Image (tube, rainbow, N blue to C red):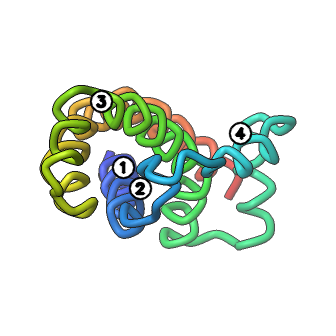
Amino acid sequence: MSVAFLAIVVTCGYRDAHRADRRLFGRSGGHGPDEVGRYRAFHTRNSYCVDLAVVLGPSFRNVILIVLIVLWPQFARQVRGEALSIKEQDFVILAKSMGVSSWKIMWRHIFPNVTPSLLVLATLNVGYVVILEATLAFLG
């Protein structure tokens, strides 16, 4: 269970460390982290994780790294989709028209409205992370 919790925290922390990326928050409106998702589309998550475990080797750090690699595109797609939706809301358009900086809009309007869905996504992924960690532990 501690692996699941740590993996979710690391995944959210990794997303937080890169939240200034313009594409992640939809500020540019272009293509974002979906390229990685499309690249991984033909792999199932478990086979991808087993392949990574074979390459990286067995250790606690590598299990966390594997879970991070597998889960971050899901979090990134969620944030990007929500941010693209929120930036079209009236309160964001009003803040832009008042001359508020894009960083302030991102921190005061977009990020607080994205956080609840990320918490739900993290909660829903805890069970998957437990099963994934058990799979990787079973394989050695």
Q: Which residue is mark 4?
A: 46
- Against 56, residue 124 (above or below) is above
Q: Residue at x 44, y 52 (%)?
A: 27
Image coordinates for residue 67, horizontal then vertical, percent: 54, 53
Pick the front one: 125 or 54: 125
| Residue picked out by circle 1 | 8
Secondary structure of the residue carrying numbered label 3: helix
**What residue is pinned by disc 3?**
117
Q: Is residue 33 left or right of residue 85?
A: right
Between the C-alphas of marks 2 and 4, the distance is 17 Å
Mark 2 touching mark 1, by CB under 8 A?
Answer: yes
User: In terms of secondary structure, where does tag 1 sit?
Assistant: helix
Q: Amino acid at mark 3?
A: Ser
Query: Which image quarter is the N terminus in?
Result: top left
Query: Which comes before the other along the chain, label 4 or label 3?
Result: 4
Sequence-first disc among 3 and 1: 1
Find residue 114 and report its image quarter.
Answer: top left
The tag on residue 11 is: 2
